[in-house]
Image (cartoon, grey):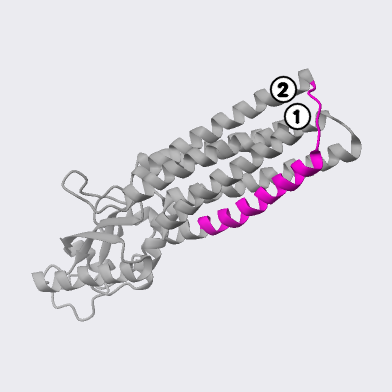
Amino acid sequence: MTIRLQRYIAFISVVLFLAKLLAWYLTNSVAILTDALESTVNVIAGFIGLYSVILAAKPRDLDHPYGHGKIEFVSAAVEGALIFIAGLMIIYEAIAQLIHHAPLQKLDWGIYLTAATGVVNFVVGTYAISVGQKNRSLTVEAAGKHLRSDAYSTAGIVIGLVLLIVTGWQWLDSAVAVAFAVMILVTGYKLIRKSMAGIMDEADVALLAQVIKVMQENRKAQWIDLHNLRVILYGDVLHIDAHMTLPWYHQVTDAEREIHAVEELIQTTFGNRVEVFIHVDACMPYQCKICAVPECPHRHHGLQKLLVWTVDNVLADSKHGKETD
């Protein structure tokens, strides 16, 4: 699904780029040139994104035991850098237009063509964001956000050109270009920041909270403690590993049953593209105070307070329970 959509995005980006070049050729508007320059980024990013999505879909191998999903972070970083460079180029062209005052012409045709590309970008971008978020594909989501931000800038450029026709103020062409160049710079920075966070395996607090919430809401009494939880997203594959404390007298088959229960719970919630690794810890006497196992024959203390799992306590490296003594 994501590969096919990325192919469409790459093809559409070429068509829209040619349409914007035609609009710029007809009008000589630096604001429309702004849109065209950003579309060059769409074209390059579209094909880079297509390559990264195809590579990310490859199964893991001996050289890449966690799969190839991280290529999507690299792709998004390249796209963000290209967006940022396009923003700088737009500001340069806008200033040059203010200084030299090249005459504008056929703005009506330029507005029609530019507006049409904006509508297409908005529709395709919104759909790509939805698919990217559903399939946890950073490349497709980034492409969708880029297309939709392109649509917003196109809308602003069209409004600026309409005002230019109404007022006759030629400087509006450059002013509109600079305003949306700043927006493009911000978009590029945010995309670079997000991709670098993925490359550096920065914790996704929102995703962590979601995983913990699912575990807490479906918690079994024998799941005494959960700690050292880590969640990493590589492409569309979610890797989860954690330490879970179970009753010390459980046999291997009992522990295996509980691990499979956790795996099924996570996969039911987040999809089949999930790998779960659980390290089993044996409970300690001091954890009786946070243990809800009914009729435990080896209990040293009664249950005092069940520990509610949260982002703050589940990320801890050691077992819980000592602090309640």
Q: Indicate the amino acid at tag 2.
A: Ile
In the rendered image, residue 32, in percent from the top left (x then y), is placed at 70, 36
- Quadrant including the C terminus: bottom left
Residue at 66% x, 26% y: name it: 91
Depth check: give the residue in front, 271 or 39: 39
Depth check: give the residue in front, 20 or 274: 20
Q: Examine the rendered structure and indicate whether residue 220 appears above or below residue 17.
A: below
Residue at 15% x, 70% y: name it: 256
Residue 68 in view of the camera: yes
Name the image quarter holding residue 260.
bottom left
* SS at circle 2: helix
User: CB under 8 Å between callouts 2 and 1?
Assistant: yes
Residue 136 in view of the camera: no
What secondary structure prevails in the magenta region? helix
In primary-sequence order, the first of circles 2 and 1 is 2
Magenta stretch bounds: 101-129
In the rendered image, residue 94, in percent from the top left (x then y), is placed at 71, 26
- Quadrant including the N terminus: bottom left
Residue at the spot of label 1: 174
In the rendered image, residue 89, in percent from the top left (x then y), is placed at 61, 26
Name the image quarter holding residue 200.
top left
The stretch drawn in magenta includes residue 108: yes
The label on residue 95 is: 2
Q: Indicate the amino acid at tag 1.
A: Ser
